[in-house]
Image: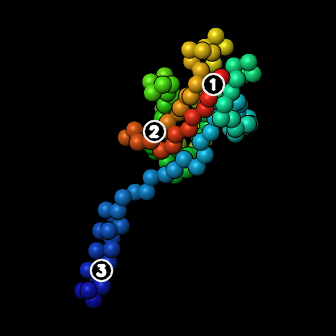
């Protein structure tokens, strides 16, 4: 009986000490709009003549209780950050950026959004080209 008890206690200790599996970003994309909490059209570049804003959408799974940040960067400089508290097992969030047509020339090129977890680890990263 003692070996079984020892084995059970050892198994319980491993279970309690095992690292908790962090969730994941199941979808991350740029879109020109959101409808009913879903992206309407995935894009990887936009033209200043066609669109004045862009949104970054993420679907998060198994991250309830965590904070996730959208970090918008341009030329490796952080331009904007928004942190979300994830309140469910499947959570969809997005941030948007208004793009001013007069920015063409000075703000054109690659923009990146990093999805960061509580300790600022990059969970996902996507870029789009602003022309």
The percent coordinates of residue 69 (x first, y second) are 48, 35
Residue topped by disc 3: 7
> Vertical placement of 121 versus 99: above or below?
below
The percent coordinates of residue 72 (x first, y second) are 51, 28
**Dot placed on the residue nearer the N-terminal end, 2 or 1:** 2
Residue topped by disc 2: 116
| Residue 70 showing in the rendered view | no
How busy is the neighbourhood of tag 1: few (under 14 within 10 Å), some, or many (20 plus)? many
Residue appearing at x 63%, y 25% in the figure = 130
Specify whether 99 is left or right of 18.
right
> Vertical placement of 50 versus 18: above or below?
above
Q: Are marks 3 and 1 in contact (CB under 8 Å)?
A: no
Q: For mark 2, give the secondary structure.
A: strand
Q: How is the image coloured?
A: rainbow
> Vertical placement of 19 versus 28: above or below?
below
The percent coordinates of residue 100 (x first, y second) are 64, 14
Task: Point out the image quarter for the N terminus.
Answer: bottom left
Of the two numbered discs 3 and 1 in the rendering, the one whose residue sits closer to the viewer: 1
Spot the residue most to the top.
102
Q: For mark 1, give the secondary structure.
A: strand
How busy is the neighbourhood of tag 2: few (under 14 within 10 Å), some, or many (20 plus)? some
**Dot placed on the residue nearer the N-terminal end, 3 or 1:** 3
Residue appearing at x 51%, y 43% in the figure = 124
Distance from disc 3 to disc 2, alpha carbons, whole Å, reads 39 Å
Distance from disc 2 to disc 1, alpha carbons, whole Å, reads 23 Å
Specify whether 35 is left or right of 57.
right
User: Could you say which is closer to the camera, residue 45 or residue 99?
Assistant: 45
> Vertical placement of 89 versus 36: above or below?
below
Specify whether 16 is left or right of 114.
left
Residue appearing at x 65%, y 23% in the figure = 131
How busy is the neighbourhood of tag 3: few (under 14 within 10 Å), some, or many (20 plus)? few
Of the two numbered discs 3 and 2 in the rendering, the one whose residue sits closer to the viewer: 2
């Amino acid at each position: 009986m003692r070996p079984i008890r020892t084995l059970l206690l050892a198994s319980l200790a491993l279970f309690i000490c095992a690292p908790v599996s962090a969730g994941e970003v199941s979808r991350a994309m740029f879109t020109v709009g959101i409808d009913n909490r879903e992206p309407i059209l995935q894009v990887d570049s936009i033209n200043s003549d066609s669109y004045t804003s862009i949104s970054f959408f993420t679907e998060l799974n198994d991250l309830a209780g965590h904070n996730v940040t959208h970090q918008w960067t341009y030329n490796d400089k952080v331009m904007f950050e928004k942190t979300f508290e994830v309140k469910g097992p499947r959570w969809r969030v997005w941030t948007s950026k208004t793009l001013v047509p007069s920015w063409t020339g000075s703000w054109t090129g690659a923009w990146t959004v990093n999805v960061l977890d509580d300790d600022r680890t990059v969970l996902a990263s996507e870029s789009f080209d602003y022309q």
